[in-house]
Amino acid sequence: MLQQEQLEAAAVAAAEAATEEAAAAQAAAATAAGATAAAAAAATAAAVVELEYQQHQQQQEQQQRQQQQQQQLLLLLLLLLVYLNS
């Protein structure tokens, strides 16, 4: 009888240990999932910042081209005015 009780106690202890290990594994999986989600959010934020930077650069380049074209047009008009007045 004592041996059966010892076996049952060992089985209960093993089941409890397995339950604790399963809970620890579940917690580790949840932590890993959280870290994965955080990494994905950081990557998304970085992509948004990169896109905004590229858009800003394109706007600046477009403004510079427009200014150059305006300056060239003004220079042509000035030359035309000088030509017509001579």
Image (cartoon, rainbow, N blue to C red):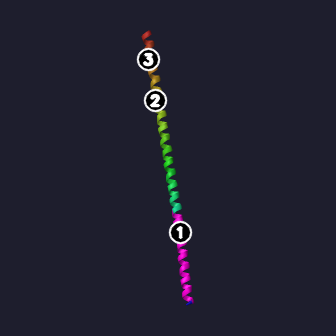
Identify residue type, mark 2: Arg
Amino acid at circle 1: Ala
Question: Closest to the observer: 3 or 46?
Answer: 3
- Give SS at disc 2: helix
Residue 77: image tag: 3
- Give the Cα separation between the discs numbered 1 and 3: 81 Å
Q: Which mark is residue 23?
A: 1
Image position, residue 46 (x, y; %): 51, 47
Q: Position of residue 57 (x, y in %)?
A: 49, 37
Task: Give the mark nearer the N terminus: 1 vs 3.
Answer: 1
- Does dot 3 land on a helix, a strand or a loop? helix
Spatial CA span between label 3 and label 2:
18 Å
Name the foreground residue: 16 vs 36.
Answer: 16
Magenta segment main secondary structure: helix
Dot 3 or dot 2, earlier in sequence: 2
Q: Which residue is mark 2?
A: 65
Please indicate whether residue 55 sits to the left or right of residue 5 in the image.
Answer: left
Q: Which residues are magenta?
A: 2-29
- Is label 1 in a helix, a strand or a loop? helix
Q: Foreground mark, 1 or 2?
A: 1
Is 42 drawn above or below residue 23 in the view shown? above
At horizontal 45% and vertical 28% (from top left) the residue drawn is: 66
| Label 1, residues with CA under 10 Å away: few <14, some 14-19, many ≥20 | few
